[in-house]
Image (cartoon, grey):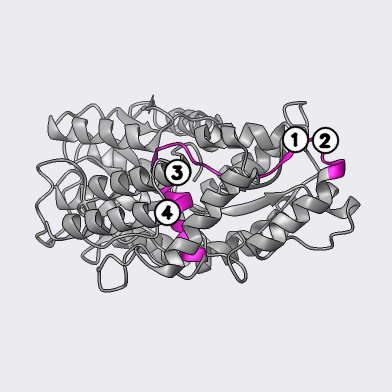
Amino acid sequence: MAPVAALGALALVVGLSACSSSSKTTTPPTKAGAFEGRGPITLATGKDTSGYLQTALNNWNSAHPNEKATLIELPESADQQRQQMIQNAQTKSDAYTILNTDVVWTAEFAANGWIEQLPEDQFALDKMLKGAVDTAKYFGKLYAAPYLTDAGLLYYRKDLLDAAGIASPPKTWDEMKADCQKVAPQSGGASCFAGQFEKYEGLTCNFSEAIDSAGGQVIDDSGKPVVDSAQAKQGLDFLVKSFQDGTIPKEAITYKEEEARRAFQDGKLIFERQWPYMYAKANATDGSSKVAGKFAVAPIPGLTGPGKATLGGHNLAVSKFAKNKASALDFIKFLTSQDEEKAHLLKTSEAPVYAALYDDPELVKQFPYLPTLKEAVSNAAPRPKAVKYGEATTAIQDAAYAALTGTKSSDQALKDLQSKLTEITKK
């Protein structure tokens, strides 16, 4: 997930929630709220590292001088964004009109009455990817507009693989490690692989993808924690042993999205698990990237074949406590229109929610990874709608970080996580 939010991802848990003590309402919604009032609005979002959002706001403001939209940039960290949005809602502040939310927050925010139900007939949901639409609903009702989708991809140094006589990217973890051995003599000292392993939402994503890619699950389809399994251990062991044997460099324990991106762009990595947003930045020809034109993307590898990415992305919601909600609704329709999403893709390489854009010959020519991304998004493991989320993701991050840093063995970390998730899901 890209760092407008640090896209964080998690093949996770039905029935998990935020740390908020008020996160207890699970009553199904009844009808969409009223969208009245016109005037100035605000958009609360993670840091706009691409510069796209301000350009979009400028275009809106030129056409709507009496309904000016102002960007409120929150921290890069998705965890900190979520906390600030929750604090704003708990005080019933009208400071945030529109919330750019991680897709996994929909159920929590809707259940607590922090966001308005949206009128479905005013959005082209039938033209959007089904997985993206599903993330925006709670009890079958639309509580946010699908805005950007996401799935982890494997970025790799195609120039180095070609020079080593490797014709195609690895499909398994073992193949990836073997490729690194072949490439090492001409890699300039680059490390083999990295992802996002700092203790934050990105670690939840990388942990979950490793578990899923080994055939395991964190929680099964019935809502029962099943993370203490042989398959989950194989997934976590891949990460733990990769840190131990140097496949993953030690400094990657501090990597979030941007640290990992910079390492890849500086030529320090052969392979990297990253979100689509990096494609445009790594291909920049302004001197900021040493690997422009030298890399390609593929599905993430797994234990016995291609791995399973986790569905990420962002939705746009209207704060329950905001003013000028009619303006807010119109602004969201503008920002999530197909034309605007195409412009967003062209500017940032972030993944749109409209299916047709992935098959547009003009776009595929400019972004050759689009077919791979569409496949990754279509096959990604969704993050279930969760009312209690904060405690679960914190427990996962604690367990994964303990195993990666050697504080606990993989067996003990998974056993403790199983116990903790069982306790959380019974609340």
Residue named by callout 2: 188
Q: Is residue 421 visible?
A: yes
Q: Are marks 1 and 2 in contact (CB under 8 Å)?
A: yes
The spot of residue 264 in percent (x, y) is 68, 37
Q: Earlier in the sequence, mark 1 or mark 4?
A: 1
The mark nearer the N terminus, 3 or 1, is: 3
CB-based contact (under 8 Å), mark 3 and mark 2:
no
Q: Check disc 4 and give the amino acid type.
A: Ser
The disc, 1 or 2, on the residue closer to the chain's N-terminal end is 2
Which residue is at 31% across, 58% downward? 415
Query: Label 2 is placed on what type of residue?
Result: Gly
Q: Could you tell me residue 172's position as x and y percent?
A: 65, 64
Q: Secondary structure at mark 2?
A: loop
For marks 4 and 3, give the one nearer the viewer: 4
Within-10-Å neighbours for mark 4: few <14, some 14–19, many 20+: many
Q: Tell me the amino acid under the disc marked 3.
A: Gly
Q: CA distance from mark 1 to mark 2?
A: 8 Å
Depth check: give the residue in front, 39 or 379.
379
Vertically, is 292 above or below 142? Answer: above
Residue stretch rendered in magenta on the structure: 185-213
Q: How far is disc 1 from disc 4 in space, using C-alphas?
A: 31 Å
Magenta stretch contains residue 67? no
In this view of the protein, can residue 364 be seen by the observer? no
Q: Which residue is mark 1?
A: 267
In which image quadrant can residue 331 be found? Answer: top left
Mark 3–mark 2 Cα distance, whole angstroms, equals: 28 Å
Which disc, if any, is residue 7?
Answer: none
- Foreground residue among 280 and 303: 303
Q: Separation of disc 4 and disc 2 at Cα? A: 32 Å
- Residue, disc 4: 410
